[in-house]
Amino acid sequence: MTLHPSDALERKKILEEKFMCGIVGYIGEKKAAPILLDGLTKLEYRGYDSAGIAVDCGENIFIEKTVGRLDALKDKLKNRLPEGTVGIGHTRWATHGRPSDSNAHPHTDCHGNFVVVHNGIIENYLPIKEDLIAKGHKFSSETDTEVIAHLLEEIYRGDFVEAVREVLNKIEGSYSLAFMAKAHPDILICAKQDNPLIIGLGRGENFIASDIPAIINHTRQTYILNDGEIAVVKKNSVQILNRQGKSVDKKIFHVTWNAEAAEKGGYEHFMLKEINEQPKAVRDTMSKRIAKDGGAIILDELNWDKNFLDGIDKIYIVACGTAYHAGLVGKFYIEKLARKLVEVDLASEYRYRDPIVDEKTLVIVVSQSGETSDTLAALKESKRLGAKTLAITNVVGSSIAREAHQVIHTWAGPEIAVASTKAYTTQLILMFMLALYMAQICETLSDERIRELICRLKKIPAQISETLSDVEPIKTFARQYGFNEDVFYIGRALDYDVALEGALKLKEISYIHAEAYASGELKHGTLALIVEGVPVIALATQKSVYEKTLSNIKEVKARDAIVIGIAAAGDTELEKYLDHVIFVPETDELLIPLLTVVPLQLLAYYAAITRGCDVDKPRNLAKSVTVE
Ligand code: M6R
């Protein structure tokens, strides 16, 4: 079978990555280290905070690892590159334990006999670790991964493959794993569960990788592992086993992507890839934070109680750009569900306007990168004034994560396109969960309402997928209106907050002038700009203000604007008045921003394509704004 970028199913399979660490393995006749380093370089685009390699050197397994970029690892390896021809390498995106030399992979058991690299999360690592410590094992990192190497040491009785199988039976969670053992220098073993893993097939050599770009320069013949499969990789053979240890017949997949397309998982741009990753990013962010019976939100990172929240008389949400827009939605959620007053502020304004902040203030900073200079400065200022601080960020170990008193992470994985997409939706998820968590503590919602909202929340990933499945009308609108100089976005309540984000997306990547207005504000000035042929995107999903929104839409329509409506499935009214309506699946009106933003992201993307813009790297903008 041929693997081609347009093959959505295969592409999805490869994109199913929990967290975006990178794995490379080599076994053959050549020196392993340069191949591993080259493979890891090809995975750099995924983002990482530390890196390491392990190479079999006969007497021992050589390991070098470091926090920071691959260049730092290469520096450490200068003049001491190991000679061995078998090895594994890893780039880490921190989850358990901050980025540091000791937390970087590979990890070993007590005696360096077993070496492992891991993408994903071992959920039951704590009880396993406690048990192993009680048995005398010494741990040298804070990671969940290290338990795997020690478990292997504990279980191994001479049969490496069998020991790995037993380890896999004991761990719960998601993983792609690669193993080496000092006593078995002719074997690499790898295993997959919920994280991608492929085997590259060569002549007299074979490769392991978490993603195609790492091996594409060496081979295009691959096996794509399925969940529950284990591969025993030797230089002249590859055997795939299922969980029961039975051999599996595997078809070879021939990769036809070029290296550049492979980095983007076959998508034309990172932005499109990241838009399509949203169901998974959102699912990862909410998973493990919902009680098994679906009746409560669990935020282990916070230990808030009624006393703590009663002691807070003011909440600020402070952020920049898209994160600020997520903050606006957060205000709506917290005020509506937990009945606490919230102010949202742009970090660049907040830090200079002498905000009224004291020890009864909670300041929530939101930042994808965790490095935005204005947000970091606002956080420091809040701390100086005595506030309690909470960071919502996507990057473990980032400056903002380290500076704040408490942190909750979005699990979106690295976002590479300058235009923020999956970071926004995951921030919305955490804002919603935080508001529900506060509502639980403050008892501002009934148990039934909490349960109902959680039930709706759990459906969101699938509903985003559904929204993503029909892009053709959006492409057509973008082509039709892609060269207009001005576009207006209107909406009320949460629809207005999403309109702001939609307008920002269009501006930053397509360079079209776009403005968002609260529909009720039109008649206070902006209506003067609405003339024949002006495109207006009208969001109309908020039931409580639906009639009012509709009359605003009619006002615009009466001026002969071209109006594209965004509505919830089941709305039969809007179509009567509008040129086009894009429907998103029906959900609670509080959660619908997670769906309505998707067509707006796509509209911006396809408008930028129509205009021939550099989508992933728009002019004048940087991904992380670390200067004022
Ligand atoms: O990393 P941060 O979330 O702190 O970044 C904040 C903004 O710079 C960022 O959201 C920016 O507005 C995006 N380019 C919007 O797509």
Image (cartoon, rainbow, N blue to C red):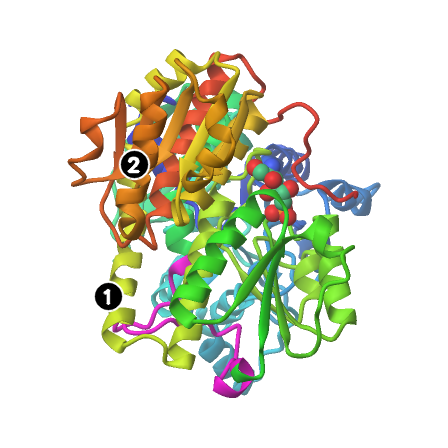
Please state, as top left, top right, bottom left or bottom right, where the C terminus lies in the image. top right
Q: Is residue 291 left or right of residue 422?
A: left
Report which residue position mark 1 lands on: 452
Quarter-of-image position of residue 87: top right
In this figure, what is the number of numbered marks?
2
The foreground one among 329 and 598 is 329
Whether 491 is drawn above or below 107: the answer is above
- Which residue: 34% across, 43% down? 595
Q: Earlier in the sequence, mark 1 or mark 2?
A: 1
The image quadrant where one finds ligand 1 is: top right
Image x and y of residue 212, in percent: 48, 32
- Which residue: 73% across, 58% down? 378
Q: Main secondary structure of the magenta part?
A: loop
Residue 165 visible (yes or no): yes
Q: Amino acid at mark 2?
A: Ser
Q: Is residue 417 left or right of residue 623?
A: left
Q: Amino acid at mark 1?
A: Glu
Q: Residues within 10 Å of mark 2 (few under 14, many from 20)?
A: few
Helix, strand or loop at label 1? It is: helix
Report which residue position mark 2 lands on: 551
Whether 342 is drawn above or below 475: the answer is below
Mark 2 vs ligand 1: CB below 8 Å? no
Whether the magenta-drawn stretch holds residue 293 is answered as: yes
Whether the magenta-drawn stretch holds residue 149 is answered as: no
How far is disc 1 from disc 2 in space, using C-alphas? 31 Å
- Which residue: 53% across, 72% down? 301
Q: Is residue 182 left or right of residue 569?
A: right
Magenta residues span: 285-309
